[in-house]
Image (cartoon, grey):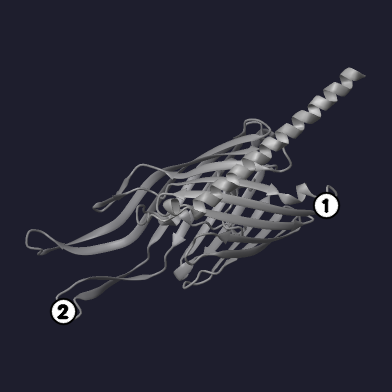
C-alpha cells in the first residue's frame, strides 16, 4: 500500500512539475511578444520595399481574417497551406475543401482554393493542394510621347498574379506535427512600350512577367497540458528573382505562435463553450516585427464569434467575423476596417467530407 501511495504521489508531483513547465514556457513566450512590440530598438527601424510579390502576404481565409491571421498553431484543414502546413496534419475527415474570396483594398480580388486528402486513415499523412489567383482590375496603360501632356494612352492592362502549391503534413507523435509545401508563383503586370537604341529611335514592347518557386514549412507542438499549443512557420522561402532590371526576394516571413482554449482553465463542465486565444509574433523581411492577437468564442461547435487585433499597424487594427458549422459545412465571414482604404471583406466555404 505504501508503495502504491508513493508511486501515486510521485506521478502527481511529476504532473504538477510538467504543468509548471508549460506555464513557464507560455509566460516566456508572451514576454517575448511584449518585447517585440514595445522595444524601440526592435520595432522602430524601417524595413520597407525589400521584397516583391507582396500578394503572397495577403490571406483570403475568412476565419483567419477575423482572427488577425493568428493561425500558426491551429488545426484548420487544407486552409493551413496558406499559413502553416503543419496545421493540416490533424485533419479528421478524408477530404477537406476550402473556397475563399477576399475583396481587398482598391477593388483587388483574391480567390483561394485548397484541397486536403487523408488516405489510409492518416497513417501516411495528409496531402494538400492550394491555389490563389489575384485580379488587380483594369489599369490604363501609357507611354512617353512628344505632346503637351508628355504621354499618350495605350491599351487597357489587366494585371494578375497567382500561386499554386502542393503540401504534405504528418503527425510524428500524438503531440508533434510537421508540414511543408512547395509552390510555383508568378505575376503578370501587362506590357511596357519604351524607346530603345542608341538614339532612342526604336520602340520596344516588353511583357512584364516574373515567376518563382517558393517553399513553406512549419511545426505545431501540443503540450498535453489542457489545449496549450506552440507552433512556428516559415513562408515564402526562395532565391532572388529578376523583374526587368531589378532583383528582389519574396516576402519571407517567420512566425511563432501560441494558442489555448482558456475555458479549460475554469469549469470542466462547460463543454458547450470554447474561448480560443491565439497569439502570433511575426518577423517579416519587408517591415518591422509585429504581434497579432485573435479571439474565437464558439457555442455548441455550431456558432463562432471572432475578433482580432493587429498591434503596431497604421491602418489595419481590429478585425471581426463569425462562422457557422453544420453537417460538415463551414461558412465563415470576416470584416476588417482598413483606415483610409476600403473596408476588407472575406468569405469562406469549407466542406469536411
Where residue 326 sits, quadrant-wise, is bottom right
Query: Which of 289 and 182 lies nearest the eye of the viewer?
Result: 289
| Residue 334 visible, this angle | no
Residue at the disc numbered 1? 270
Label drawn at residue 147: 2
Horizontally, is 182 left or right of 210 in the view?
Answer: right
Disc 1/disc 2 C-alpha distance (Å): 74 Å
Horizontally, is 282 left or right of 304 in the view?
Answer: left
Residue farthest to the left?
Answer: 199
What residue sits 22% from the left and 61% below the top?
205
Query: Which of 323 and 295 lies nearest the eye of the viewer?
Result: 295
Asked which secondary structure carries label 1, the reply is loop
Q: Quadrant of the N terminus?
A: top right
Crowdedness near tag 1: few (<14), some (14–19) or many (≥20) residues, C-alpha within 10 Å:
few
| Residue 14 visible, this angle | yes
- The earlier-in-sequence mark between 1 and 2 is 2
Q: Name above or below for residue 312 compared with residue 155.
A: above
What residue sits 55% from the left and 38% below the top?
179
Amino acid at each position: 500500500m505504501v508503495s502504491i501511495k508513493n508511486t501515486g504521489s510521485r506521478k502527481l508531483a511529476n504532473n504538477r512539475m510538467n504543468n509548471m513547465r508549460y506555464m513557464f514556457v507560455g509566460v516566456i513566450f508572451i514576454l517575448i511578444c511584449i518585447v517585440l512590440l514595445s522595444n524601440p530598438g526592435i520595432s522602430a527601424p524601417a524595413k520597407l520595399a525589400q521584397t516583391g510579390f507582396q500578394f503572397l502576404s495577403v490571406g483570403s481565409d475568412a476565419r483567419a481574417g477575423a482572427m488577425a491571421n493568428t493561425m500558426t498553431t491551429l488545426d484548420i484543414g487544407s486552409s493551413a497551406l496558406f499559413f502553416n502546413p503543419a496545421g493540416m496534419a490533424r485533419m479528421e475527415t478524408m477530404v477537406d475543401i476550402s473556397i475563399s474570396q477576399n475583396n481587398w483594398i482598391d477593388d483587388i480580388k483574391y480567390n483561394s482554393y485548397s484541397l486536403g486528402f487523408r488516405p489510409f486513415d492518416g497513417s501516411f499523412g495528409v496531402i494538400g493542394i492550394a491555389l490563389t489567383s489575384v485580379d488587380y482590375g483594369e489599369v490604363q496603360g501609357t507611354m512617353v510621347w512628344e505632346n503637351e501632356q508628355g504621354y499618350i494612352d495605350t491599351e487597357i492592362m489587366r494585371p494578375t498574379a497567382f500561386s499554386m502549391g502542393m503540401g504534405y503534413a504528418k503527425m510524428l507523435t500524438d503531440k508533434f506535427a510537421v508540414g511543408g509545401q512547395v509552390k510555383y508563383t508568378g505575376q503578370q503586370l501587362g506590357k511596357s512600350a519604351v524607346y530603345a537604341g542608341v538614339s532612342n529611335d526604336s520602340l520596344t514592347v516588353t511583357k512584364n512577367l516574373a515567376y518563382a518557386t517558393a517553399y513553406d514549412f512549419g511545426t505545431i507542438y501540443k503540450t498535453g497540458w489542457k489545449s496549450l499549443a506552440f507552433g512556428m512557420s516559415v513562408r515564402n522561402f526562395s532565391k532572388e528573382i529578376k523583374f526587368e532590371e531589378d532583383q528582389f526576394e519574396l516576402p519571407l516571413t517567420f512566425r511563432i505562435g501560441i494558442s489555448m482554449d482558456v475555458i479549460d482553465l475554469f469549469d470542466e463542465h462547460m463543454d458547450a463553450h470554447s474561448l480560443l486565444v491565439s497569439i502570433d509574433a511575426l518577423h517579416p523581411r519587408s517591415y518591422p516585427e509585429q504581434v497579432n492577437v485573435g479571439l474565437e468564442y464558439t457555442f455548441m461547435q455550431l456558432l463562432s464569434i471572432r475578433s482580432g487585433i493587429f498591434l503596431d499597424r497604421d491602418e489595419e487594427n481590429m478585425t471581426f467575423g463569425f462562422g457557422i458549422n453544420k453537417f460538415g459545412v463551414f461558412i465563415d465571414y470576416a470584416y476588417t476596417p482598413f483606415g483610409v482604404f476600403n473596408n476588407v471583406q472575406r468569405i469562406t466555404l469549407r466542406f469536411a467530407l
